[in-house]
Image (spheres, rainbow, N blue to C red):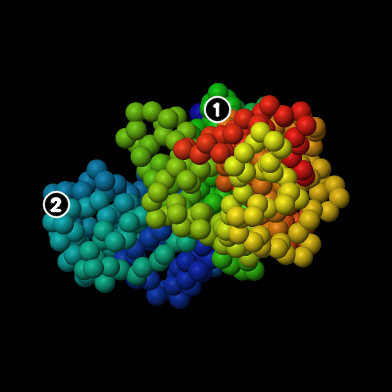
Amino acid sequence: MSAYQALYRKYRPQTFDDVVGQLAVTQTLKTQLITDKMSHAYLFTGSRGTGKTSCAKILSKAVNCLNPENGNPCNRCSACRSIDEGSCMDVLEIDAASNNGVDHVRDLRDDAVYTPSQVRKRVYIIDEVHMLSISAFNALLKIIEEPPEHLLFILATTELHKVPATILSRCQRFSFRRISQEDIAARLQYVAYQENIDMDESAARVLSRLADGGMRDGLSLLDQVASATTGELTADAVYACLGIAGQQRCGEMMGYIADHDTKGALQLFNSLYAEGKDLSALLDELACLTRDLMVIKTAPGTGIAMLSGVASDGEISSLKDRFSTGELVRMMGLLQETMSGFTRASSRRLDAELCIMNLCQPELSLDAESLNARLTRLEDRLKSGSFVAVAPVKAEKTPVPEDLDDERPPLPGDEDAPPSEDAPPEKKPASNSNAPAGFWTDLMSASRKELKPPASGFFVAAQNSPLRGALKGDTLELRCLNTFVADTVNRPQILEVVTIKASALLGRPVKVVVVDMSAKPANNPQMEKLLNFGRAHSDVIKIKE
């Protein structure tokens, strides 16, 4: 019984035509082979899993193949078979990470001068060449510049900036680009079909996104999830196997952040943590979604092709208008800072929870990015018309009678009471200053739907309600029975909702203020008399709507 072979090894390309997503590189190499215009040294650069080593092995077979087919090796002759089996002594693959000293390069240089014994060309494939030391690079310079005719060097690296310019100038450079998600998904579906793996299209899309442009990563992930799943391989099965929150949960978390619902976001995070989801993967998904939202807001038309695929187009469309660009920039910076600190953090859960709290509540931070996020959010709401700015209205002094023994004086709420003789002339309210019929009932109902407990419990149009309203011109007073009600209602997010609803019902901007009817003005005996009188006659004194 033969040993199991990993999928990325089993399905390694054997010809240039098998290489996925690198047509510019493979076509050039095939043309050089057909026209016999081969260089003596090649440098393959690019990110991991894009085909650098595979193309190097194919090229080593193609230059030695006895029966080449349109630039491709035949994979049937003795030369091709010996190279595939690793028994050809003239084709050597060297790992520069473990052979990076000058002595190793000197030995290589001394052996390279001998003519090949089995094939036509002696080929040296030096993988991760950037790991060589400076002295090793210097020892390699002369033989790369003027090698014997039978010698071919193929260098491969993922970090081009670490290769000296003296080496770069002596090689033909080929850049391997990241493979597109569509190409990776198509290759994964082909491999799944060959291996009798029942995989649907959604699972292939998720795996191709997680591969991040590397075919080897995609095949390794497919190998992992296929061995852990029985039955059909779906996107949910991929999420469960790899410990990823998934498209739906990630969009739900972003919705809580948009609503500044810290409680809901932390509850969702706690459930994901209890399910064993990877915290780094969760924050990475949020960062990808944040990046997609920034792209679609700044480039609405052309940005669709740049999306990472972490969320569906419908989710992107529903979320993009709920964030300002400043908020998204702040969120991206916070997520990246948290993820970079995971490597040295003693408690990842605590760091992730603090990150989510800061995402939901930008007011917790007073740095420039947080302030900019709050300002841009306000600007976007003003542009969209969902928030109406009102001009400040100067408060007018309510006349207080000198004596309360003979008759009941005008109380706050008695809008129709005549002003005292010493009071300054009262400014007449603007037209349509009186509230229309049913205004208070409609306002309470509309506000209650948008608010959460305990504040929503006070917005009821009942006779014994602890909250009453009085409309004076363009100012709506929310008159609270006690300090607790006043403190609960007097919050920016609550006043914002009431302001929007009241302005919409009246058809003009209004200003909303909170009045605590139980507060005692300091050093004001007349007001104290007034409040005592109101408490004693609370059954007959009612604040008008």
Left or right of residue 99, residue 193 in this image? right
Residue 277's place in the image compared with 170, above or below, is above
Left or right of residue 515, residue 348 in this image? left
Left or right of residue 231, residue 132 in this image? left
Disc 2 on helix, strand or loop?
helix
- Picture coordinates of residue 66, whole percent (x, y): 46, 60
Residue at left offset 74%, top offset 32% = 465
Residue 450's place in the image compared with 68, above or below, is above
Residue beneath label 2, please?
Answer: 102
The quarter of the picture where the C terminus appears is top right
Residue beneath label 1, please?
Answer: 270
Q: Amino acid at mark 1?
A: Asn
Q: Amino acid at mark 2?
A: Val
Crowding around mark 1 (Cα neighbors within 10 Å: few <14, some 14 to 19, many 20+) is: some
- Picture coordinates of residue 44, whole percent (x, y): 38, 61
- Picture coordinates of residue 160, whole percent (x, y): 32, 60
